[in-house]
């Protein structure tokens, strides 16, 4: 398969995944909103925002850095194996440190008084420890990542409808989401033996990649302030009900955002490989086309979402959430800013 055909195929695979990412929340969000209510959604979002922040520390910037480094040595079996284990052992060390802090803070000391829900969120931390999706992105094998994610998300959808029946089932709802994330990442380890050799202790050197991963971690931590920690701040300043309103007001915008940003995920390893081959003119061409496409597509989706919010919210979320209409209009702007930012953060 030629490079161009492979890129198109990868984009199609990723678009299929993004469509599933859109369809499943469209099915589950109205159901969860009505069953769990604003306070239940708020409690789930509040604890999840903290857990997700810790997963960023666990992965330590490796989701972007790792795929880039793997793309550099793609095709060399010995180098790719050594590269993989060095990067993953760094991820393992950072995950153990972040996971320990999480357990001490929110389980043992229970500093926020929500110990049980934080325990239900803990599989997110474990999922980050074993997350090697960056490897398959680096070798541009999007078919495996898409298939894995689709199967896990469908399983989660089925379990939510079967097991979540009332507000008392909030913990089940949280556990289903976190366990599905863990299961999805666990599947990658069944596939990895096809690509890498067993690690050799003498070849392991995690410090080689520490600086590079840290460099990409810093902007990700900053991004988490408005991606996840905003819910944490709102929960501390007001109530879980307000967190529920705020979280739902951004849900559709963030779902739509996955369509626009899917291009960055596909192009990033290709650009990394071009950079390794010093094909700078081709990189410039890809970046220009990517910026034009991303800007046009994001403006289209933003304007559409803002226009339909007034009629969409009561139908989709229920009358209890009608207060979020103006917030949803304002939140739709994140599609433009995050998409364009993603082009430079992930591709450039």
Image (cartoon, rainbow, N blue to C red):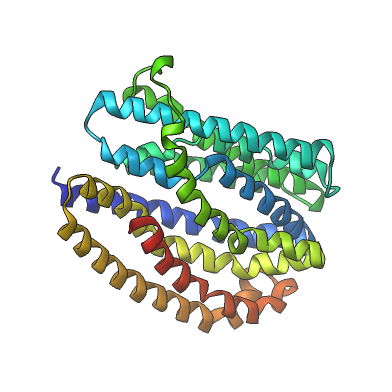
Q: Nearer the viewer, residue 177 or 101?
A: 101
- Whether residue 165 is situated above or below residue 205 in the rendered picture: below
Determine if residue 143 is in view. Answer: no
- x and y, in percent, of residue 123 in the image: 64, 37
Q: Is residue 249 left or right of residue 262?
A: right
Residue at left 62%, top 38%? 125
Q: Position of residue 88 (x, y in %)?
A: 46, 31
Q: Nearer the viewer, residue 68 or 218?
A: 218
**Above or below — where is 316 with respect to 60?**
below
Q: Horizontal placement of 34 versus 88: left or right?
A: right
Query: In this view of the protein, which residue sits in the foreground, 116 or 146?
Result: 116
Quarter of the image with the N terminus in it: top left
| Residue 139 position within the rendered picture, expressed as x and y whole percent measured from the top left | 29, 38
Query: In the displayed structure, does residue 232 sit left or right of residue 295?
Result: right
Can residue 66 be seen from the camera position used here?
Answer: yes
Q: Is residue 28 above or below residue 308?
A: above
Tell me which residue sits at (82%, 42%) in the image.
115
| Residue found 45% across the figure and 73% down from its top | 336
Residue 30 in which image quadrant: bottom right
Quadrant of the image occupied by residue 180: top right
Residue 312: image quadrant is: bottom right
- Image quarter hosting the C terminus: bottom left
Residue that lies at the very extreme toward the left in this rendered image: 2
């Amino acid at each position: 398969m030629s490079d161009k055909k492979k890129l198109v195929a990868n984009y199609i695979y990723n678009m299929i995944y993004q469509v599933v990412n859109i369809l499943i929340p469209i099915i589950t969000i109205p159901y969860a909103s009505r069953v769990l209510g604003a306070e239940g959604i708020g409690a789930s979002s509040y604890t999840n925002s903290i857990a997700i922040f810790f997963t960023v520390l666990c992965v330590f910037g490796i989701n972007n850095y790792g795929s880039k480094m793997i793309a550099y040595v793609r095709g060399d079996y010995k180098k790719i194996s050594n590269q993989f284990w060095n990067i993953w052992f760094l991820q393992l060390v950072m995950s153990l440190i972040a996971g320990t802090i999480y357990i001490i803070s929110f389980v043992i000391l229970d500093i926020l008084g929500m110990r049980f829900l934080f325990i239900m969120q803990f599989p997110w931390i474990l999922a980050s420890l074993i997350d090697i999706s960056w490897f398959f992105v680096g070798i541009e094998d999007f078919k495996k990542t898409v298939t894995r994610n689709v199967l896990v998300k469908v399983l989660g959808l089925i379990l939510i409808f079967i097991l979540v029946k009332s507000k008392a089932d909030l913990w089940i709802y949280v556990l289903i989401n976190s366990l599905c994330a863990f299961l999805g990442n666990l599947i990658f380890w069944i596939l990895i033996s096809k690509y890498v050799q067993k690690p050799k202790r003498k070849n392991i050197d995690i410090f080689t990649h520490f600086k590079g991963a840290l460099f990409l971690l810093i902007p990700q931590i900053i991004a988490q302030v408005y991606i996840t920690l905003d819910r944490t701040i709102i929960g501390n300043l007001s109530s879980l009900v307000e967190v529920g309103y705020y979280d739902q007001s951004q849900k559709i915008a963030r779902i739509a955002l996955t369509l626009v940003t899917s291009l960055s995920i596909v192009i990033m390893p290709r650009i990394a490989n071009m950079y390794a081959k010093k094909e700078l003119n081709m990189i410039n061409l890809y970046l220009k086309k990517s910026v034009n496409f991303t800007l046009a597509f994001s403006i289209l989706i933003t304007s559409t979402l803002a226009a339909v919010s007034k009629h969409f919210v009561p139908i989709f979320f229920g009358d209890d959430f009608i207060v979020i209409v103006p917030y949803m209009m304002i939140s739709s702007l994140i599609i433009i800013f995050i998409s364009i930012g993603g082009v430079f953060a992930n591709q450039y």
